[in-house]
Amino acid sequence: MFYECTMAELRVLFTRDQIARRVVELGAQIEKDFAGQSVIFVGVLKGATIFLADLARSVRVDATFDFIGVASYGAHKMTSGEVRLTKDVEQPLTGRNVILVEDILDTGLTLQYLKKVFLAHQPACLKVVALLDKACRRIEPVKADYVGFTIPDEFVIGYGMDYAERYRNLPDICVLPPEDL
Ligand code: PRP
């Protein structure tokens, strides 16, 4: 399947049905691991919003949401290496079961930074769920506890992920051809 866009034809990497099935599987794992407990899902703005919305609805445990914002200096399609906080969480995390929700794990610089921020709050437990893992690009030795799909080094958009803030609303995850970057 292809999308007709102003820039290019976008190749679908994961259809909305494939994503939905995998999200339900991830939700079942989290539900099993946290049965009878409360969790707080913390989504990393903005890419993780759609994933968080779907994932949280597939986990039948007592849950709350929060969001954190980060930016990489000068970054658009490449990570620059310097991460800063643009929005902090609004709820206390101390003693809570925190599930950090990421759309994609790439170099690991963002997650490395966020883990430090979160652990400073002294949560009861900190788990990371990433829908996509571009493991081949890792610079920092960080891992997610739950991974949807491991993907090759291609520029992905859709299902919350953007190129220059566009395409987040595509229901499928697509690849933007290198000539359009
Ligand atoms: C993406 C993603 C992660 C980060 C991962 O965010 O949501 O936060 O990049 O990259 P890293 O492992 O190389 O640090 P992005 O900067 O694209 O912002 P967005 O979520 O607002 O689109």
Image (cartoon, rainbow, N blue to C red):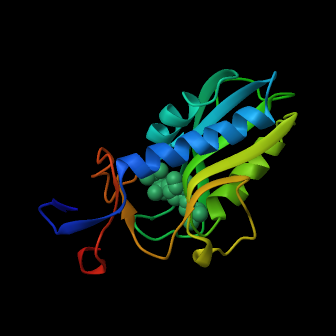
Q: Quadrant of the C terminus?
A: bottom left
Q: Is residue 116 left or right of residue 163?
A: right
Residue at 29% x, 48% y: name it. 170
Q: Is residue 100 above or below residue 163?
A: above
| Quadrant hosting residue 148 | bottom right
Residue furthest bottom as drawn: 179
Residue 151: x percent and y percent? 51, 69
Residue at 65% x, 32% y: name it. 41
| Quadrant hosting residue 139 | bottom right
Residue 32: x percent and y percent? 76, 35
Residue 172: x percent and y percent? 33, 52
| Quadrant hosting residue 88 | top right
Residue at 28% x, 52% y: name it. 167
Whether residue 88 is visible to the viewer of this picture, yes or no, is: no
Whether residue 119 is visible to the viewer of this picture, yes or no, is: yes
Q: Is residue 149 above or below residue 127?
A: below
Q: Is residue 52 above or below residue 73?
A: above
Residue 44: x percent and y percent? 56, 43
